[in-house]
Image (cartoon, rainbow, N blue to C red):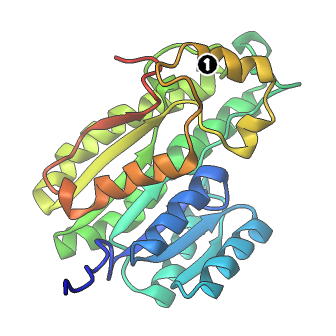
Amino acid sequence: MTAPQTPPHTGRVVLVTGAAGGIGSAIAEAYALDGAAVGLVDFDADAGRALAARLGDAGHRVHFAQADVANHAACAAACADIEAALGAIDTLVNNAGISPKHAGKPAPIWQMEPAEWHRVVDVNLHSVFNFVRILSPGMVDRKFGRIVSMSSVAGKAYLDIVAAHYGTTKAALIGMTRHLAGELGPHGITVNALAPGRIDTPMVAGAPRAANEAVIDVTPLRRLGKPGEVADACLFLTSPKADFITGQVVDVAGGWLMT
């Protein structure tokens, strides 16, 4: 009789930002099911606590810390809180991101308020600096770390369904991923990114039906992606099977916008 295999992420401590959202919650649950202790960070305290309660009631080790990911001090406090509860964080998933719409449409650059531009850059890009800056010293000391950041196909090509701030931040994350992979690689740390396409989350479900159908029509697999499919790709990139993969951007887009 074959002995049951130990889940690949057993013993790992994972921090997921934007954990209460559609993709974030799928990633957090996938890591919990794969044996990891999971730190949840989100601005939405009620949703974050609800996710932590659900996963905790299922027997998983989880801890929620509320934080504005754009605020460095708040990020540092959240990391300290999670490490006090779960142990040293060795895996970081930078999933937090926003894409403001106005009556369901992105604002063109000539109508965009400066405050909106800065907020998107702060949440989508500066948050990654915050968490990597805070957690990388420990990873360097331990000679081990795994980092995955959430880019987008919108960071690789123009899409009229998002605004300039979103596309710019997602493109910047690709460049940041490659630089960090080179900088942190000698210390045993891999850094990769995912570029999801149109994923069937509550936010996407609330978009005009025609917008989603237009994407499906030009997607070779002829459907929207599932949050769990993004989670599976994330788990692969931080698993032992991907120990020799770094500096890469993996599309999870059903073939949409192949480059």
Residue visible at 38% across and 48% down?
233
Q: Position of residue 55 (x, y in %)?
A: 61, 78
Q: Residue furthest top?
A: 110
Residue visible at 20% across and 76% down?
142
Mark 1 is surrounded, within 10 Å at the Cα level, by few (under 14), some (14 to 19) or many (20 or more) other residues, namely some
On screen, 216 above or below 183?
above
Q: Position of residue 178 (x, y in %)?
A: 26, 37
Amino acid under label 1?
Val
The quarter of the rendered structure image containing the C terminus is top left
Residue matched to label 1: 215
| Quadrant of residue 258 within the rendered picture | top left
The quarter of the rendered structure image containing the N terminus is bottom left
Residue visible at 26% across and 38% down?
248
Give whichever of 40, 259 is nearer the camera: 259
Q: Residue furthest front?
A: 1
Query: What element does badge 1 sit on?
Result: helix
Using residue 130 as the reference point, say whether residue 181 is left or right of it. Answer: left
Q: Position of residue 135 (x, y in %)?
A: 37, 67
Using residue 95 as the reference point, say whether residue 108 is left or right of it. Answer: right
Using residue 151 as the reference point, say whether residue 145 is left or right of it. Answer: left
On screen, 129 above or below 33?
above
Residue visible at 75% across and 21% down?
106
Q: Position of residue 49 (x, y in %)?
A: 72, 75
| Quadrant of residue 201 within the rendered picture | top right
State how many labels appear: 1
Give whichever of 128, 200 is nearer the camera: 200
Give whichever of 221, 177 is nearer the camera: 221
